[in-house]
Every structure is written in C-alpha cells, then in structure tokens.
C-alpha cells in the first residue's frame, strides 16, 4: 500500500511541476502583459515598415509585433480562419473587418514607448488580442 501511495505522489508532483513550468514559459515569452486571456502565437520583430498578420480562429499570428518607436507600420492582414474577424485598435480608431479568406491593410504608428493593443471585436473575450510594442 505504501509503495502505491508513493508512486501516485511522485506522479502527481511530476505532473504539477510540468504544468507550472509550462505556464511560466508562456508568460515569460510575451513582451507586454495584456489583461484577460491571450492566445499567444508568438512575437515578430520588424526591422522595416511592414508586417503580415494572420487572423485565424481565434488568434493573431504573430500576437506581438515589436518595431522601432515612431515607425509608420503597414499591417497586412489575412483572415485564414473560418469566421469573420476584425483588427481593432481603440485609439487611434482602427477597425478592419475581414470575412474568411479575405485580406486587408491598415497603417498604424508605433508608439514612442509602451504598446498599442489590438483585438478582434467578436473574439477578444476568448483571447484574440495582441499588441504592437515599441522596441528600440
């Protein structure tokens, strides 16, 4: 009986340890913290003035975009998902709606510091959000 208990205890500890490290690494990979759920599909460092972003069910790829402060950034959007999505920024007001299979472009200015958050109006609550981050 003691042997079974020890086996279960060790297995449980390994499982909890694995879960803990997984959560830590995803939080550490985000360049900024956004409130609520974020379906993190990575970070793209942009050296030029344009970036491609895929909108799919229910995330932006990449989720985080790092660019030089003050850059006028052209964001090329492609909805690769099966439902309508938006690329929305509250201020300055930007709202581009894309049906499945469609593409579009928006131009935004990277802030001098901090980040500019974007999201899908329909799916933000389930983690479809990201940020453009100023990085010198």
Image (cartoon, helix red, strand yellow):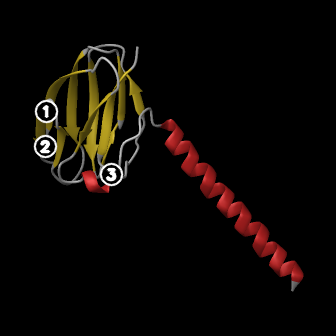
The residue depicted at 29 percent of the width and 48 percent of the height is 128
Q: Nearer the viewer, residue 123 or 76?
A: 123
Frontmost of labels 3 and 1 is 3
**Residue 120 drawn at (x, y percent):** 21, 46
Q: Residues within 10 Å of mark 3 (few under 14, many from 20)?
A: some
Figure check: 70 above or below 102: above
* Cα distance in 3D space between marks 2 and 1: 7 Å
Q: Nearer the viewer, residue 24 or 80?
A: 24
* Cα distance in 3D space between marks 2 and 3: 18 Å
The residue pinned by badge 2 equals 98
Q: Nearer the viewer, residue 81 or 50?
A: 50
The residue pinned by badge 1 equals 104
Q: Do the residues labelled 2 and 1 touch (CB within 8 Å)?
A: yes
Q: Quadrant location of residue 69?
A: top left
Mark seen at residue 127: 3
Figure check: 98 above or below 69: below
Please tell me which of labels 3 and 1 falls first in the chain: 1
* 85 on left or right of 61: left
């Amino acid at each position: 009986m003691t042997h079974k208990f020890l086996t279960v205890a060790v297995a449980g500890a390994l499982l909890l340890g694995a879960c803990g490290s997984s959560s830590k690494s995803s939080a550490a990979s985000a360049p900024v913290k956004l409130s609520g759920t974020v379906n993190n599909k990575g970070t793209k460092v942009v050296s030029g003035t344009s970036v491609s972003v895929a909108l799919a069910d229910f995330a932006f790829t990449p989720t985080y975009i790092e660019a030089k402060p003050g850059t006028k950034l052209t964001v090329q959007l492609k909805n690769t998902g099966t439902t309508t999505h938006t690329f929305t920024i509250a201020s300055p007001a930007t709202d581009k709606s894309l049906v499945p299979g469609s593409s579009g472009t928006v131009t935004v200015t990277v802030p001098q510091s901090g980040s500019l958050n974007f999201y899908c109006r329909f799916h933000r609550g389930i983690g479809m959000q990201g940020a453009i981050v100023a990085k010198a």
